[in-house]
């Protein structure tokens, strides 16, 4: 079932960007917004546009995960990955939801926002920013063999319990697609921060300090997610390049 986005351009343009966003957070203290979307979904373009606008915010990590369950209606999404569908279903299971749909945004692995509801999304992001960080991430990009990362429980956080999954996300900043079939036939659409790869690089029990080195084999943007396994809260996130 697809949901029609409730708010459009005039509303989502009100999201803070630029100088206002610069003071909202650091590169290692990000709110993660995952958009589950599809090129076969007629109600998705406003949400896709909203996610693209979020890329202007240094305090937010917006990620587009294209799902494959609309491919049958006439257009195969070029970026769809069954792993993204499994991830969305995992969030639904943990959150007690009976269905998955597009467009859907999941914020820090916990709260879901329907469609392109910019006002609700802004409120949810602000609420997550107000919460103390649970995990401290230290990044050293000068390591000879990759990016050195150190994780530890934040001083203000309660005791952490595992399993905690450390995931490396690689994504394309912008892709443009001419859609010739399906519900969006004839449209040329831009897609921002298209997730191409999510790899689990470490497991952590939340105790002590976890040190690891992440090797980046190409120049694509990379981010690290520290998540309560398998589909729980995202405890911390950072850009690596």
Image: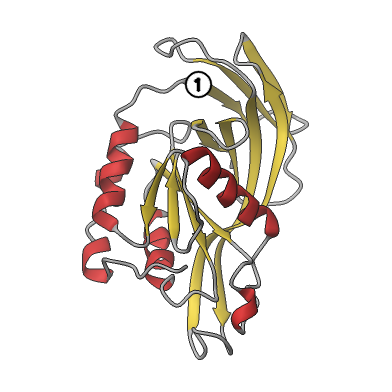
Q: How is the image coloured?
A: secondary structure
Residue 166: name its quadrant: top right
Residue 209 pos. (x, y %): 62, 12
Instruction: Relative to 62, say whether 79 is above or below.
Output: below
How many numbered dots are placed on residues in this image? 1
Q: In the picture provided, is 145 more to the left or to the right than 43?
A: right
Residue 116: name its quadrant: bottom left
Picture residue at 64% right of the left edge, 78% below the top: 72
Q: Nearer the viewer, residue 99 or 120?
A: 99
Picture residue at 64% right of the left edge, 51% below the top: 86
Instruction: Relative to 163, say whether 57 is above or below.
Output: below
Picture residue at 62% right of the left edge, 20% below the top: 150
Question: Are there few (<14), some (14-19), or many (20+) residues within 10 Å of tag 1?
Answer: many
Instruction: Relative to 207, say whether 83 is above or below.
Output: below
Residue 79 pos. (x, y %): 64, 67
Q: Nearer the viewer, residue 187 or 36?
A: 36
Taking the image as drawn, is residue 16 in sight? no
Picture residue at 55% right of the left edge, 85% below the top: 182
Q: In the picture provided, is 183 more to the left or to the right than 74?
A: left
Q: Residue furthest front?
A: 98
- Asked which secondary structure carries label 1, the reply is strand
Taking the image as drawn, is residue 214 in sight? yes
Q: Nearer the viewer, residue 195 or 7?
A: 7
Q: Quadrant of the C terminus?
A: top right
Residue 206 pos. (x, y %): 60, 15
Q: Nearer the viewer, residue 177 or 102?
A: 102
Residue 17 pos. (x, y %): 29, 52
Q: In the picture provided, is 74 more to the left or to the right than 234?
A: right
**Dot 1 corresponds to which residue?**
135
């Amino acid at each position: 079932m697809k949901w029609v986005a409730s708010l459009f351009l005039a509303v989502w343009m009100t999201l803070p960007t630029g100088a206002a966003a610069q003071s909202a957070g650091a590169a290692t203290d990000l709110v993660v917004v995952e958009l589950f979307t599809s090129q076969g979904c007629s109600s998705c373009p406003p949400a896709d546009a909203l996610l693209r606008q979020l890329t202007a915010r240094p305090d937010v990590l917006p990620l587009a995960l294209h799902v494959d369950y609309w491919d049958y209606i006439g257009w195969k999404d070029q970026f769809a990955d069954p792993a993204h569908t499994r991830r969305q279903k995992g969030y639904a299971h943990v959150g007690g939801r009976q269905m998955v749909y597009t467009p859907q945004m999941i914020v820090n692995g916990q709260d879901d926002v329907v469609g392109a509801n910019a006002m609700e999304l802004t409120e949810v992001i602000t609420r997550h920013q107000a919460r103390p960080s649970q995990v401290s991430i230290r990044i050293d990009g000068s390591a000879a063999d990759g990016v050195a990362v150190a994780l530890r429980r934040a001083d203000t956080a309660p005791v952490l319990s595992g399993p905690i999954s450390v995931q490396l996300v690689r994504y394309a900043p912008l892709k443009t697609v001419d859609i010739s079939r399906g519900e969006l036939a004839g449209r040329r659409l831009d897609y921002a921060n298209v997730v191409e790869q999510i790899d689990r690089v470490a497991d952590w029990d939340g105790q002590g300090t976890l040190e690891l080195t992440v090797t980046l084999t190409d120049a694509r943007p990379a981010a690290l997610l520290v998540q309560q396994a398998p589909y729980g809260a995202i405890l911390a996130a950072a850009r690596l390049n």
